Amino acid sequence: MANEHSHPDIADAMAAQQREISVSEFFLKNRHLLGFDSPSKAALTTVKEAVDNALDACEEAGILPEIRIEVSNQTDDSLRIAVEDNGPGIVEEQLGRIFGKLLYGSKFYKLSQSRGQQGMGIAAVGMYAQLTTGKPLHILSRVETEPTATELFVSINTAKNRPEIHKKKRVAWDCPHGTRVEARIDGNYQQGNHSIGMYLKQTAIANSHVTLHFQGPHGEQWDHQRSSVELPHRPVNVKPHPRGIELGQLIQMLSNTQSRTLLQFLENDFARVGRKTAGKIIEESHHNLTARSYPKRIAHLQSQALYRAIQKVPVSAPSADCLAPIGEQQLEEGLRKEVDANFYTVLTRRPAVYRGNAFQIEVGLAYGQAAGAHLELDERGHIHKTVRQPTHAKPELEPHPDEPAFLLRFANRVPLLYDQEGCAITKAVLQTNWHAYGLDQAKGALPHAPLVILVHMASVWVPYGSEAKEAIAPYPEIVKEIRLALQCCGRKLAIHLHHEARVKDEFDKRTHIEKYLPHVGIALQQILELSDEERERVIKRLDDVLQEKRRL
Amino acid sequence: MANEHSHPDIADAMAAQQREISVSEFFLKNRHLLGFDSPSKAALTTVKEAVDNALDACEEAGILPEIRIEVSNQTDDSLRIAVEDNGPGIVEEQLGRIFGKLLYGSKFYKLSQSRGQQGMGIAAVGMYAQLTTGKPLHILSRVETEPTATELFVSINTAKNRPEIHKKKRVAWDCPHGTRVEARIDGNYQQGNHSIGMYLKQTAIANSHVTLHFQGPHGEQWDHQRSSVELPHRPVNVKPHPRGIELGQLIQMLSNTQSRTLLQFLENDFARVGRKTAGKIIEESHHNLTARSYPKRIAHLQSQALYRAIQKVPVSAPSADCLAPIGEQQLEEGLRKEVDANFYTVLTRRPAVYRGNAFQIEVGLAYGQAAGAHLELDERGHIHKTVRQPTHAKPELEPHPDEPAFLLRFANRVPLLYDQEGCAITKAVLQTNWHAYGLDQAKGALPHAPLVILVHMASVWVPYGSEAKEAIAPYPEIVKEIRLALQCCGRKLAIHLHHEARVKDEFDKRTHIEKYLPHVGIALQQILELSDEERERVIKRLDDVLQEKRRL
């Protein structure tokens, strides 16, 4: 079978070439996986990773976040991006690893909601800066207990995935506590739906407790003031929920547990399993398993039986402790503040589970073109035609009648701007029958209506479609929950549209009356020989009577 | 600013939670990144990773590949997948790391075309097996110089990303050299466009030197015999091409080089840079750079100048040595063998570069519905209507008149079955104006025609959109090359379609003649009082004359 190329030692020769691959080198070569495929996307990713970290740190420390974002063009054509927060600061010995090592962080092994989860983002920014401009990250950080801040420059030794620290020193900083990170990258500052401005605007919608100050490269400058001084409920760390865990995970948990009996194991190592449920699971397992079985000695066949029993016995839904959804009130306030529309409806669903991970879906709809003319009923039932003026200080985000609905996707309060096609949220929106709620929709497309659709997934672990965290992987349990939430909001929208159609009808009738009444008045004046004053009084009276009648 | 949650030591408390994240744990939690999101995709990914490795090993060792794939359902509802090759085998000390450690391999640091490149795939299969069934991979491997094979079971210690080897022993194996890997996974064997069968069929199209034996879980069994005994040209390892490298990469190369002068560095460390081009680059750089500058001492500003000069000075296109395209002849043979159509056209473009990486695009089109009736001109110019019978032994892949074109995507001879939307190939096909070549096409859609479109990207480094290697990231240079190749094949298709329209026209005329000639014959017989024989002779003569005239 072997031809002339082959020689007996080939296996040895091939073995000699095998080597370990540094995780940094891997992502350096695959930087598009981390969101650095193009200069404009790289600029957005840089802001996003820094802002997400800043928000996580502030919230964990119980501080209301105030964040400054500065973007400026440099003479060498590179982009300088600086993000400064008022967070708790980072202790000096950690600074290098946090900014100069991939796969390092505090959030990966926790089961509680946070923006970051992979320990990758900000170090990836540093790696990209290094690759494209050769400049290390410039860091300034001060913790409250220290009189001065630490300043340092950090780059990554990609061969070893280790930080390299340059010029570290203590400096005075008038900020009492916080962190500032500055990157010089090959980047492109652009406008539009994938812009830094759009990301910040959407961040404000989902985080009404955040104050943002933005400064762009062309002199743009705007602030977003927080509308709430309440921090999101701080999510607690939970144990895995038994629903949907996998056999291999169960086997690993059995072998790692501190519990000395199976009953204890089920009670202690899972969320929502009490003594009674644990007993039922053991009973359902058979295979010689008892409450007192020693977890580490459970054989493979027995663990399979246990696994099946766990899937069979009903367990209550996960608690909401580990999650921090936006909440219906703040979601609606956020939408009203940032999206000019006529009609708003929101919904926060109860927590659900996919693969043992708790998650919660929220949906908001904003309908109608507020910037144009529209009709309103006042408290007396009278109709007004009003025109609202749009404001252009910040990037605009409005329902538009000539375009498909505008979809806003969020995961753990972070806007997702790229890869809309691959996202569980998009799948759920496309699967929803918007016709049923009175909207136009082509097959397999977004509804065609002046509509903004907002969907938020809060979870202890968001299954992102890539390391760049741009889309949610379409696990069926997640798509289903989103669909249910959309349907519920869709029904409320349908009621509004029905009402709107009725108002329109009223308005048309009213217009008719207004059109003909003066002629009726003139006719009556001639027949009854009324004075002009009497004629006006009669018309007024007639108008009131007709209006009254129609309202009954 | 700090509210009641905050306390001065919060930064220390947060620092204490920071830890290193194991790369295995990262991918275990994110297994959808590696192609294991659903049981049916997991089954395909398992076969694909094992077959890709087998083909790479055989070709590197100069062995014509013969591969057996067995899929069977187990009593515990799991799927057993075994892949066996006649490759060179793997030496015993490497077996554990190759199958039980992520980011370990021989292909990552090379710049030459291979199927695997990340050192991830097969270990990921093991990790998924472990997670879903708790079973380790079962390996058998023999190298030619050993009298027996090594058998072992290997699982991954995910916390440490290290192999754990069980029950290793030497066993007799009648195969003189090769490797067999068997996995027990939570998988689903399905039919259709994303099936294992479709993957193997497409593998055969792009690899005519491969023999495959398949055995499915429901008694399916088929073989694919190689049609060529020629191994692909063995790609050599090359240096980076200067076109499109990045500043950071250049800085790293300068600091790692063995060369003692800038001139040597440019000549030795890049592909396609000779003394003359190197001299021109140095001249173009200014900034006190000379041929004798010591590379490791080049300052940041100087390296920027050098970088700009490299982008400015023309460098010849990369050589084809490092690439192993399928080639026009084998591509057309592969298409003809596996796709029944009327018309075939193929093209292999010359090598191009994106970001310093050489790549080459190949395109094949197969048009027309061969399984149904179709028209043919014989060498005399006479028209025949023929009907070909489809064969159903293997999964079918035919151009279909009522459906959009069928797109076959390949990267380094490996079929890409998932994530069609996100792929550079799909983008290029959608951007192509198929109307211009006589086909129907809705806006932003695949052309609607009985057409199979095959696109292959061969590269020293394919920028996959995810670790699961299902799509090519749409770098502009790549999309452009694909579009140019499609346009060229499209023009050939247009000529064929024009010709086909003419043949159809001929056929219609011929049909008319055939219809009326007998009547003419009868009329002549009556007028001239001919015998039946004379009438037939006259008709025959008339027919010949008319045919002759039409052909002039």
Image: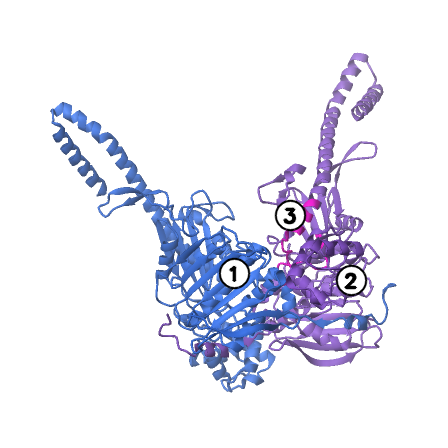
Chain colours: A purple, B blue
The N terminus of chain B - image quarter:
bottom right
Q: Amino acid at mark 3?
A: Ala
Decide which of A91, A513 is in the foreground and name it.
Answer: A91
Q: Which residues are magenta?
A: A456-484
Which marked residue is nearer to the observer: mark 1 or mark 2?
2
Q: Residue at x 54, y 84 (%)?
A: B295
Q: Which residue is mark 1?
A: B81
State whether discs 3 and 2 lie on one chain: yes
The image shows residue B539, relative to residue B490, as above or below, that is above
The image shows residue A431, relative to residue A182, as above or below, that is above
Residue reaching furthest to the front = A288
Task: Determine whether, in the image, residue B5 is placed left or right of residue B386.
Answer: right
Q: Amino acid at mark 1?
A: Ile
Decide which of B493, A480 is in the foreground and name it.
Answer: A480
In primary-sequence order, the first of circles 3 and 2 is 2
The image shows residue B128, relative to residue B516, as above or below, that is below
Name the quadrant containing residue A79: bottom right
Which marked residue is nearer to the observer: mark 3 or mark 1?
1
Total numbered circles: 3
- Note whether residue A179 is visible: yes
Q: Chain of mark 2?
A: A
- Note whether residue B241 is visible: no
Q: Indicate the secondary structure of the residue bearing disc 2.
A: helix
